[in-house]
Image (spheres, rainbow, N blue to C red):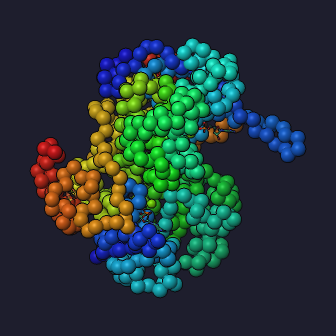
Amino acid sequence: MNDIATSHRGTVSDDVLISVDGLKMHFPVTEGVVLRRVVAHVKAVDGINFEIRRGETLGLVGESGCGKTTTGRCILQLERPTAGSILFEGRELSGLKGDELRAIRRRIQVIFQDPYSSLNPRLKIGEIIGEPIRVHGLIPDKAKRDQRVRELLAVCGLNPAFADRYPHEMSGGQRQRVGIARALGLEPDFIVCDEAVSALDVSIQAQVINLLEDLRDEFDLTYLFISHDLSVVRHICHRVAVMYLGKMVELAETDELFDNPKHPYTRALLEAVPIPDPVIEQARAHQIIKGEIPSPINPPSGCVFHPRCDIVVEGCPKAVPAFREVKPGHWVACTEV
Amino acid sequence: MALLEIDELKTQFFTSAGTVLAVDGISYTVEEGETVAVVGESGCGKSVSALSILRLVADPPGRIVGGRIGFMGRNLLELSDREIREVRGRHIGIIFQEPMTSLNPVLSIGTQLTETVVHHLGYSEQKAASRALELMEMVGISDPPRRLEQYPHHLSGGMRQRVMIAMALACEPKLIIADEPTTALDVTIQAQILELMKNLTRELGVAMIIITHNLGVVARYADRVNVMYAGKIIETGTAEDVYHRPRHPYTLALLNSVPRVDQQRSAKLDPVEGQPPDLTRLDGSCSFRPRCRFAQEECAQAFPELAYVGDGHRAACFRSQEIAAGLEQVA
Ligand SMILES: Nc1ncnc2c1ncn2[C@@H]1O[C@H](COP(=O)(O)OP(=O)(O)O)[C@@H](O)[C@H]1O
Ligand SMILES: Nc1ncnc2c1ncn2[C@@H]1O[C@H](COP(=O)(O)OP(=O)(O)O)[C@@H](O)[C@H]1O
Ligand code: SF4
Ligand code: SF4
Ligand SMILES: [Mg+2]
Ligand SMILES: [Mg+2]
């Protein structure tokens, strides 16, 4: 493991927490009102493999519609995958039932992008955070639970008195902290952060990023950090996976991926990100990727990236490139790398 | 004389919670063909300042209560409703964040494009149709005849924004105001759209005001930058001055808050704490004071005026000279 990455971003063990193998999520597209016929499938996630180590933050990036959220929802068991397996501590998630399922559900939490729509507007902040703790039977005693809620608010940088307020009385950044406190209340091991800081202004975003890092270190959390913001991902993640049209195209340790991107799509993504320095920007070539991400209903043949690829060769539309390890820990799905 | 001269513009909203000082005496100029950015976090008054130039602020509750906006020899604030409508679309093109709200969902793209030139330039139907085709090609939309017959919902977000650019350029305006034109788009499509806007404004000599909260976008595309905080411009200068020699603590803090895609991580982020003030409760002192790590006694006494800290570079801070001398290391 890369020393720099580990020292600045907390420690990561070699212990695999989550293992995703051959995951597919195809949504049926139906037609007809009375007799619904399946006329096609949206291949939202189309055969991906990756592992997440205990203590690690794995970034998941790519243009909207490439399947990031669906991947997260499969791990959260909010979708029933079409194929593939998801192991949590070596145990198949889809096989779990009853108490075991409930126990695992508690240990896997989520923080969404939109703090406005993910908090029930009719509940007080104290109830929003306290209710899941009660439902999971973690702290049955009301007074103790209220005390825990105040502690959680404080841990997330909010005034404990906010327990008596409603979501609409708070700013976007404060609501995002409530979402984090709610997830944290269930003492999870693993949190899917789905665009968790994307809607926030830069100074508030930086505050919440620091909070997520502090909590990761303090409570030994593991994150799947889904984001379209590559700068934030570079900052917070240990390793990063790049998705395109339901497939994984590249996976590497963070600095390796950003300093030495191999896949033409990863390169194009990085090229597109404007850097907050006008002198650097003036010197950049600005090779801009053409076209838009195609529909996942009828993805292009062979390498799904071929219609937009700037180094496409004759064989690309014919065969799906294997996702292979081109150097230790650096995986790429491109025949020309 | 500059193409656009905004002088002490003040726009307020009169609400039950009090008077919102949304734009509180801002002044700046835009030269012919120049790209000027207005940057700042949400609620600082960027959109209201742009809507004020176009006189599109909803009244009530909003009202432009003072200032002057000189454009092509006239004060836009003194024009009749009919005259300002003539300026909008004809001399000043507009591009908003969400094209769906500015495109008419029940009219075809072609109808909307031709309507603009027929209305403003008095083109015949035929001449307008060929202008529409030309515009579609100019903004890089393939198969224009087919696209012109489509409706906005047939198009992707990126395509719709291209159509908005075509509409904004249709009458060969002098100035385009683009309010967060790429905020809703993926970074790849954002790069395509901004490159298109840059190339077209350069080729056609159109000036642009680009409003954004994205510091990278500003660095890539703007000649000059106005940084806004709580309804005021707190720092202004060339992009290079503002990014490499920031003289206002808020600008410094903003730059320290953004992670960098091009550099290895060196430390935790160092953001400014707290949040922007309530614009109904400003007390006439420096509005950044509650969050400022350089604040001292005098900052509570008055609002610091924008003062020169370099050639064409101004900042509104009592301590900008000390910051220039390296106060950042001391603090
Ligand atoms: N429930 C669903 N039914 C049908 N299509 C879906 C569903 N959920 C997501 N999709 C489609 O799957 C693709 C991937 O979506 P998503 O995982 O949300 O992407 P991302 O999070 O990367 O933007 C998109 O084309 C989306 O429209
Ligand atoms: N219609 C309105 N009524 C009351 N306040 C408004 C209205 N529109 C904008 N404001 C207020 O004006 C201020 C500036 O808003 P705006 O210019 O939209 O900010 P920005 O574009 O920088 O995010 C904000 O405090 C906002 O709440
Ligand atoms: S396999 Fe071919 S089309 Fe796909 S990324 Fe590599 S070169 Fe491009
Ligand atoms: S005037 Fe004072 S409070 Fe305001 S930004 Fe400068 S140092 Fe900070
Ligand atoms: Mg998503
Ligand atoms: Mg705005």
Q: Quadrant of residue B112?
A: bottom right
Residue A99 on image: x %, y %:
64, 21
Q: Is residue A268 above or below residue A218?
A: below
Q: Is residue B35 visible?
A: no
Tell me if residue A269 comes above or below residue B169 in the rendering.
above
In the rendered image, residue B308, in percent from the top left (x then y), is placed at 17, 64
Give whichever of A250, A172 is nearer the camera. A172
Q: Does any portion of residue A118 appear in the rendered image? A: yes
Quadrant in the picture for residue B256: top left
Count numbered badges in the picture.
0
List x then y, in percent, for residue B66: 35, 79
Q: Is residue A132 above or below residue A87?
A: below
Question: Position of B19 compared to B144: left or right?
Answer: left
Quadrant of the frame with the N terminus of chain A: top left
Report the image quarter containing ligand 6. Answer: bottom left
Residue at point 64% right, 32% down?
A78
| Front one among A14 and A337 | A14
Q: Residue at x 32, y 31 (%)?
A: B264
Looking at the image, residue A76 lies above or below residue B207: above
Q: Nearer the viewer, residue B202 or A44?
A: A44
Residue drawn at the location 36% of the way across and 37% of the way down: A210
Q: Nearer the viewer, residue B272 or B153?
A: B272
Q: Residue at x 34, y 66 (%)?
A: B281
